[in-house]
Image (cartoon, rainbow, N blue to C red):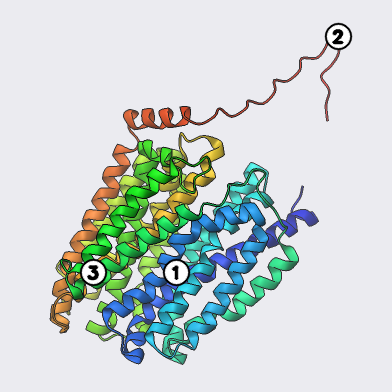
């Protein structure tokens, strides 16, 4: 097929619709980060309220992403994709009209539920639309580049909207884009289902939601109520009980939502932990830096967005070379490089003051952004390496869920540390020092996991996990032509 073939043009339009859904969900996250001070001032929100404004969204995505993917396989991917677009768009409209903080958080959760139906299902649509491996690889490359574009566009667009029309405009922009994507999906996206979809797992889903919600709530609210108070201790116990009950229950199911056998593979478990760690660092960095630039340094939302362009640019450029680096040098080199860059960027800010020179900030942003851009490809590569081909999609989806868990934890942990002391500017910057050191540790952990997950011993654990799954049928051998006859050609 050539580029002028109608089927190819249609496939490209489907890819554009899927990338459009990714664009609005990622831009929404980074743009809302820039708007946090304005939201806090307008709705009289404390730091915990700002944490929930971000975490209500990311927690919903993390909790329901696996459910959305399996539901799309079962009832139709286009149907779930359209439901996600509609819910995300309506949630954006509701957020723009929110009269108080509690309403805004509730509507952000609705947005997150919609977003959880978009990204995993869109990736399945792309895989179905581009069955030829080379075209599929290029399509997924475009999908990945959209993330870099979104990260670059989000802070600047968010700052511009806040400056010109207020923080509510950040949600207005999603409405026409979401509506257009909804119409185009009805016209262009083909309906598809998995040949052997997994059964629904309501108990496993309930355990995931309980575990994550209890943990995040305890971390955020514990900064004020005290981590030794009875409600917080009870929530931590509930989260721990969910973490124990989930694998215990899932082992008994023929088609679990999350197969515990995966975690017997050191490469897979290491990739999952690296995903949580890297995105904990990224979301925590964005949260602390936004409050620092606007509340401490006094920059406007637009100025703060422009100052973070080196970070977004570093992420975008590094994302484009990450796949090639992983293919040429292996996941170990890429993960170690990513971890070192993340740690170096955070270490630059461990002595942050209200008057830290701008060049120091910009260097920190560039280093951290480059590390965050490199880390994605080797995480996915490590997660699926050595896994049965039939399980590669599920293992990648679990790792993507780990990224969203990291997003939620980063805002919860780093925000709680910064909010602990008194509210004066000097106290805020002093409190962030521990947070930056935690991010240094996150970078070091990513680099360490890059070594541990790519060793021979780690590969051996992956091989043992593969052996526990049914063998995939081998393709039928080619029939040898009868003597004297030439092979048939097509």
Question: Going 48% across and 47% down the picture, which residue do you hit?
Answer: 396
Q: Secondary structure at mark 2?
A: loop
Q: Earlier in the sequence, mark 3 or mark 1?
A: 1
Foreground residue, 374 or 54? Answer: 54
Q: Tell me the residue at 52%/79% (across/down).
A: 92
Quarter of the image holding residue 86? bottom right
- Residue 152 bears which disc, if any? 1
Of the two numbered discs 2 and 1 on the same chain, state the one appearing first in sequence: 1
- The correct choice, above or below, for 166 with respect to 363 in the image is below
Given residues 2 and 332, the one toward you in this image is 332
Is 479 positioned to the left or the right of 352 in the image?
right
Determine if residue 58 is in view.
Answer: yes
Looking at this rendering, what residue extends furthest in the right direction? 485
Give the vertical position of 39 relative to 265 (above or below): below
Q: Position of residue 198 (x, y in %)?
A: 58, 47
Q: Nearer the viewer, residue 331 or 245?
A: 245
- Residue 354 placement (x, y as % from top left): 17, 79
Q: CA distance from mark 3 to mark 1?
A: 40 Å
Q: Are marks 3 and 1 in contact (CB under 8 Å)?
A: no
Say whether marks 3 and 2 touch (CB < 8 Å). Answer: no
Image point (83%, 23%), residue name:
488
Mark 2 lies on residue: 484
Q: Which residue is mark 3?
A: 231
**Displayed quadrant of residue 19:** bottom right
Q: Position of residue 473 (x, y in %)?
A: 62, 27
């Amino acid at each position: 097929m050539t580029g002028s073939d109608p089927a190819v043009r249609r496939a490209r339009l489907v890819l554009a619709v899927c990338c459009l859904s990714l664009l609005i969900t990622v831009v929404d996250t980074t743009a809302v980060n820039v708007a946090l001070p304005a939201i806090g001032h307008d709705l009289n929100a404390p730091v915990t309220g700002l944490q929930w404004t971000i975490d209500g969204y990311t927690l919903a995505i993390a909790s329901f992403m696996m459910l959305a993917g399996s539901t799309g396989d079962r009832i139709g991917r286009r149907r779930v994709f359209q439901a996600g677009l509609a819910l995300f768009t309506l949630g954006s409209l509701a957020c723009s009209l929110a009269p108080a903080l509690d309403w805004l958080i509730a509507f952000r959760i609705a947005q997150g539920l919609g977003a959880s139906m978009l990204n995993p299902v869109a990736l399945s649509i792309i895989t179905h639309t581009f069955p030829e491996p080379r075209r599929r690889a290029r399509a997924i490359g475009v999908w990945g580049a959209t993330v870099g574009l979104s990260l670059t566009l989000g802070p600047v667009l968010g700052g511009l909207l806040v400056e010109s029309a207020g923080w509510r405009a950040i949600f207005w922009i999603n409405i026409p884009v979401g509506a257009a994507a909804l119409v185009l999906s009805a016209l262009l996206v083909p309906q598809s289902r998995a040949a052997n979809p997994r059964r629904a797992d309501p108990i496993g889903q309930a355990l995931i939601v309980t575990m994550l919600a209890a943990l995040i709530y305890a971390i955020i609210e514990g900064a004020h109520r005290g981590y030794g108070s009875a409600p917080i201790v009870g929530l931590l116990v509930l989260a721990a009980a969910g973490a124990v009950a989930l694998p215990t229950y899932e082992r008994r199911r023929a088609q679990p939502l999350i197969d515990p056998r995966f975690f017997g593979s050191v490469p897979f478990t290491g990739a999952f932990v690296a995903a949580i760690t890297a995105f904990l660092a990224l979301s925590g960095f964005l949260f602390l830096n936004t409050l620092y630039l606007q509340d401490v340094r006094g920059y406007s939302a637009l100025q703060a967005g422009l100052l973070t362009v080196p970070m977004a640019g570093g992420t975008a450029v590094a994302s484009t070379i990450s796949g090639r680096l992983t293919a040429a040098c292996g996941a170990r080199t890429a993960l170690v490089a990513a971890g070192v860059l993340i740690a170096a960027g955070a270490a630059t800010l461990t002595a942050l003051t209200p008057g830290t020179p701008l060049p120091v900030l910009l260097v920190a942003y560039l280093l951290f952004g480059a590390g965050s851009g490199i880390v994605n490809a080797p995480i996915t590569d490590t997660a699926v390496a050595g896994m049965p081909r039939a399980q590669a999609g599920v293992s990648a989806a679990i790792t993507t869920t780990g990224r969203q868990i990291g997003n939620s934890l980063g805002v919860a942990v780093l925000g709680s540390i910064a909010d602990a002391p008194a509210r004066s500017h000097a106290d805020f910057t002093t409190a962030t020092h521990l947070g930056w050191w935690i991010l240094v540790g996150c970078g070091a952990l990513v680099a360490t996991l890059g070594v541990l997950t790519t060793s021979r011993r780690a590969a051996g654990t992956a091989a043992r996990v593969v052996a526990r799954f049914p063998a995939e049928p081998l393709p039928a051998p080619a029939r040898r032509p009868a003597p004297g006859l030439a092979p048939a050609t097509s």
